[in-house]
Amino acid sequence: MRLASMHTHTLFCDGKDDIETMCRAAHARGLYAIGFSSHAPVFRHTGFKTDWHMSDEKLNEYAGEVLAARSRWHGKLAVFLGLELDYIKGLRSAMDSDIKAFNSDFIIGSIHYVVPPNGAQPFTVDGPQEEFENGIREGFGGDLEAFLQCYWTAMAEMVALGGIDIIGHIDLVKKNLLGLYAERDFLIAAEIARTAACAGVAVEVNTGGLNRAYINETCPSAFLLRIFNEHKVPAIITADAHRAADINGNYDIARQTLIEAGYTEHALFSGKQNGKPTWHIEKLI
């Protein structure tokens, strides 16, 4: 069974290793492909100063290094140029002109930030627990249900808006909620799955939380993946690797999670055709 690592971070954002080191690790582990997905710049659009997004000034250098790696590894390892793009309601999306002009091979659409409707400061759903709780108090008056509704609505908006090829760690919000879900989450997940299926978008089975030991399961969990399987949404196994040692970390758990969710196949990214991602389908069992 061929595998890839399409969600990969390097020194250009919050990763710990450089592009070449990641390529060597992927090749050594026998992977078919590696996709680089640095966190897309946000400062010019949002004014947010972070230590985990790539800077605007580094974007062209990043592309050049990934394309140079593609040339070096030709015939040995497929190398794809991508971005992980934060959808931040009203501030940042995959439809922004700089993202469209970047001409990447693929875009992972993720939600790290929630934008409170009361005008409070946006905050990250996977940040430190204290900051997360403060964000819910200030942005939602402590109403957890209102916060979750905002998160899942934003996820649905991101997928419906278009411009992405892979849905990133769809239930990342569970990091600070110990897996708390409600019936509403299943209903909106079905809406997202229907939209993704029509667009040919894949859902990733992300092992990053396992690799960094902050959750004990994949993102998403098997019970959410069942909804995507029902709508025939391709599933792609990713490590969300921030260091070479994690380039295919916990892929055995991802495979078992997919099987538990009813999947018999997983998808490998093979490029785009007519603006839509194309997937090579591999058997899981």
Image (cartoon, rainbow, N blue to C red):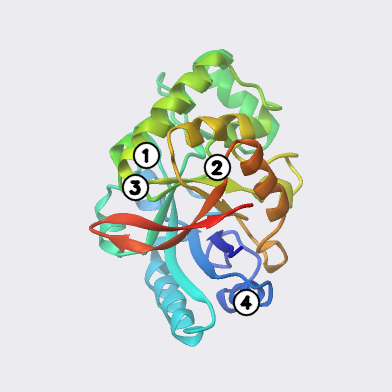
Q: Residues within 10 Å of mark 1 (few under 14, many from 20)?
A: some
Say left or right for 95 vs 210.
left
The residue carrying mark 2 is 169
Helix, strand or loop at label 4? It is helix
- Specify the amino acid type for callout 1: Ala
Can you tell which of label 2 and label 3 is closer to the viewer? Answer: 2
- Specify the amino acid type for callout 3: His
- Specify the amino acid type for callout 2: His
The residue carrying mark 3 is 45
Q: Residues within 10 Å of mark 2 (few under 14, many from 20)?
A: many
Mark 2 vs mark 3: which is more N-terminal?
3
The residue carrying mark 4 is 27
Q: Residues within 10 Å of mark 3 (few under 14, many from 20)?
A: few
**Residue 81 in the image: x percent, y percent?**
42, 67
Say left or right for 258 vs 234.
right
Residue contact at pointers 4 and 1, CB within 8 angstroms: no
Residue beneath the point at 61% across and 43% down: 258
Mark 4 vs mark 3: which is more N-terminal?
4
Marks 1 and 3, how far apart in space?
30 Å
Can you tell which of label 1 and label 3 is closer to the viewer? Answer: 1
The residue carrying mark 1 is 197
Can you tell which of label 4 and label 2 is closer to the viewer? Answer: 4
Residue beneath the point at 56% across and 30% down: 224
Q: Nearer the viewer, residue 157 or 139?
A: 157
